[in-house]
Image (cartoon, helix red, strand yellow):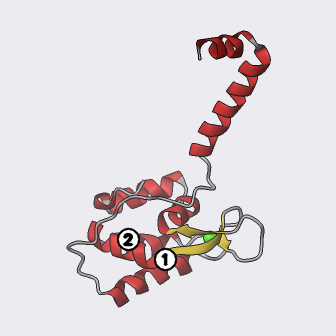
């Protein structure tokens, strides 16, 4: 093992390859191609029915699925949700087909993928809008 390390570190080609592999490994961690958040949301204590939560999820979807973003509808929907309520909305949003580059519902272009609500919100809202949402509802701690 020690011999191998000597070969790798004494050989610029091996070192270069190692560096590239390391870069790919870490760039992958921050890739926007990630399927989305895996935050273990807890629905315990939610006061929303399944139908109500699904309705909220659909409102959010409608606010984001076309070019541009209806930020005010997102604010109005999320500002009144408790953390457990959001957890239920998150689950019922599920993973919906999305085109990350255009910020629209997908289905035709290469790279379209099913994305969770956190992914959608992260892609649709800019930094300032995320701050506004955090200000309106600090409890959610989404970003
Ligand atoms: Ca959009």
Label 2 lies in ligand 1 vicinity (Cβ under 8 Å): no
Name the residue rendered at 72%, 64% in the picture: 111
User: Which residue in the protein does label 1 denote?
Assistant: 60
For mark 1, give the secondary structure: helix
Q: Residues within 10 Å of mark 1 (few under 14, many from 20)?
A: many
Measured as percent of width and height from the top left, residue 132 is found at 42, 58
Q: Quadrant of residue 85?
A: bottom left
The answer to whether one can see residue 39 in this image is yes
Q: Is residue 30 above or below residue 141?
A: above
Give the camera-side residue of 105 and 30.
Answer: 30
Residue occupying image coordinates x 34% and y 75%: 88
Q: Quadrant of the N terminus?
A: top right
Give x and y (percent) for residue 59: 48, 82
Query: Which badge, 2 or 1, is on the more N-terminal residue?
Result: 1
Q: Position of residue 31 (x, y in %)?
A: 62, 48
The numbered dot on residue 78 is 2
Instruction: Say if mark 2 contacts mark 1, CB within 8 Å.
Output: yes
Q: Quadrant of ligand 1?
A: bottom right
Task: Tell me how far mark 2 sits from mark 1, CA to CA.
Answer: 9 Å
User: Any mark on residue 32, and which?
Assistant: none
- Residue shown at 77% from the left, 14% from the top: 12
> At which x and y percent is residue 61?
53, 78
Please give left or right for residue 16 compared with residue 134 in the image: right
Q: Along the horizontal axis of the image, is 9 left or right of 38?
A: right
């Amino acid at each position: 093992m020690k011999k191998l390390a000597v070969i790798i570190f004494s050989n610029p080609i091996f070192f270069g390859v190692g560096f590239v592999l390391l870069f790919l490994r870490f760039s992958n961690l921050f890739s926007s191609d990630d399927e989305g958040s895996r935050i273990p949301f807890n629905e315990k204590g939610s006061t929303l029915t399944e139908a109500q939560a699904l309705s909220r999820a659909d409102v959010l979807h409608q606010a984001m699925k076309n070019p541009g973003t209806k930020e005010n509808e997102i604010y109005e929907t999320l500002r009144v949700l408790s953390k457990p309520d959001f957890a239920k909305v998150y689950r019922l949003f599920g993973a919906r087909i999305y085109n990350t580059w255009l910020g629209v519902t997908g289905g035709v272009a290469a790279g379209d993928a099913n994305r969770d609500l956190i992914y959608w919100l992260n892609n649709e809202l800019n930094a300032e809008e995320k701050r506004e949402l955090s200000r309106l509802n600090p409890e959610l701690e989404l970003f």
